[in-house]
Image (cartoon, helix red, strand yellow):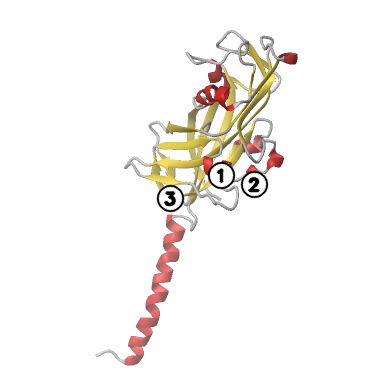
Amino acid sequence: MDRPGRRARSLFALPLAIAALAALSACEGGEADGLPLRLEISHEIAAQPLKPGAEYALPTGEHLSVDRLRYYLSNFRLHAPDGLWSTAAHSDDDARGYFLVDESQATSRVFDIAGFAPGQYDGIEFVIGVDAARNRQGAQNGALDPAQGMFWTWNTGYIFFKLEGHSPESSAKDHRVEYHIGGADLQRTVYLPLGGKPLRLDARLLATVHLQADVGQLFQGASALHLADKPTVMDPASGRVVADRYAAIFRVDHLHHQPRR
């Protein structure tokens, strides 16, 4: 028969042991709010790095110089080989999980997406634009702050994709090119396989996915945009054609992993 003192000490030690195991598991298996994935984005046109103001020959035979390229990415998910998904952290109260990419700001093209489960993944999914629920909530904060210059009115919501520049083939005033795309149903979901090398999320590593975004894809293929016909697009009806094209501009260039500091 156990002595009362020994039994009391055993019962007291049990919660401490459980807490110690939980702490060890947290250190070895991940963080309380999940693990981050770093995303790096590079822009190009026709396999050439995009440089604001430089003129590029497009697949349509037209020419374009880009003055501004901005767009929202959101609703990130990672796909595992067993078919399960891990969803990035987000909040209904702030702009967590919403990222505004701006070609003119290098820091906006490298960002960490929080909240994923540890494990191996073979695909990444995201939305170009702001999902319908948040788009209907009116002006918000952070990346969704109207001061970012990507908000129309309380009724129409956010501009999802903005491309501005010039083209000698443009029939608009001063040969301007302006694509401001947003509104109901113009979000586009993109799924990209990660190739043969798996993406590994581990508390000891920082995993990075490098995306290449080719703006020239807007002007390629059977549904290619032609600057002579549509140098300016801002209404939702015409924006649908642009939205269908910008869903095709992304590809995975490479992955890499490095020890976390």
Residue on which disc 2 sits: 140
Q: Note whether 7 is above or below 62 in the view shown.
A: below
What is the residue that sits farthest to the left in this orientation?
1
Amino acid at the residue labelled 1: Arg
**Which element carries disc 1, helix, strand or loop?**
helix
The reply to whether dot 1 and dot 2 touch (C-beta < 8 Å) is: yes
> Could you say where residue 173 lies in the image, as x and y percent from the top left?
74, 15
Question: Mark 1 or mark 2, which has the lower sequence index?
Answer: 1
The residue positioned 47% from the left and 32% from the top of the image is 190
Question: Mark 3 or mark 1, which has the lower sequence index?
Answer: 3
Residue on which disc 1 sits: 134
Left or right: residue 80 compared with residue 184: left
Q: Which mark is residue 117?
A: 3
Amino acid at the residue labelled 2: Gln
The residue positioned 71% from the left and 41% from the top of the image is 147
Taking depth in this image into account, of 18 and 60 the one nearest to the observer is: 60
Q: In what quadrant of the picture does the N terminus appear?
A: bottom left
The reply to whether dot 3 and dot 1 touch (C-beta < 8 Å) is: no
Question: Mark 3 or mark 2, which has the lower sequence index?
Answer: 3
Assess disc 2: are there few (<14), some (14-19) or many (≥20) residues with their C-alpha within 10 Å of its C-alpha.
some
Q: Note whether 131 is above or below 28 in the view shown.
A: above
Taking depth in this image into account, of 55 and 24 the one nearest to the observer is: 55
> Could you say where residue 176 lies in the image, as x and y percent from the top left?
71, 17
* Separation (CA) of disc 3 from disc 1: 24 Å
Q: How many marks?
A: 3
